Amino acid sequence: MKDLRDSIRNTGVVHGFVETLRAKKGLIQPWLEEGGAVGKFAAEQTRVLDRSILSEKRGADARKALREIEFDNDDDECSA
C-alpha cells in the first residue's frame, strides 16, 4: 500500500499541479464504493488529495497577490 500511496501523491510535475491532483482523485473515486481496506484507503487518500488541492490553491493565490503587490510597487517607483 505504501508504494501505491506514494504513487498517488507524487505528480512528477510542477505546472498544472492542482489539475494533476484532481485527476488522481478522480481515478480513486470508484474505489470509495469498495468495502474493507480498499474503500478505507480511497477515503483516506481522497482527504489527503483534497487538503493538498486546497493548500496548493491557497499558495497560488498568495503568490499571485504578492506578485501584484510587487508589480504595483515597481510602477510606483518608476513614476517617482
Image: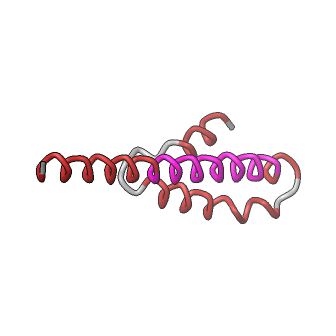
The image quadrant that residue 30 belongs to is bottom right
- 73 left or right of 78? right
Let me know if residue 32 is in the magenta part. Answer: no
Residue 7 x/y as whole percent: 55, 43
How are the colours assigned in the image? secondary structure
Camera-side residue of 59 and 69: 69
Residue at 81%, 53% (x, y): give it.
Answer: 39
Helix, strand or loop for the magenta stretch, by majority: helix
Residue furthest top in the image = 2
Residue 3 percent coordinates (x, y): 60, 36
Magenta segment boundaries in residue numbering:
40-61
Q: What residue is rendered at 48% in x and 57% in y?
A: 20
As drawn, 23 above or below 13: below
Query: Given the current orientation, which residue lies at the most extreme right position?
Result: 36
Residue 53 placed where, x, y %?
A: 57, 53
79 and 12: which is toward the camera: 79
* Quarter placement of the N terminus: top right
- At horizontal 44% and vertical 51% (from top left) the residue drawn is 60
Q: Is 55 inside the magenta-drawn segment?
A: yes
Please name whichever residue, 29 or 65, is drawn nearer the observer in this view of the structure: 65
Q: Residue furthest front?
A: 80
The number of numbered discs placed on residues in the rendered structure image is 0
As drawn, is 41 to the left or to the right of 71? right
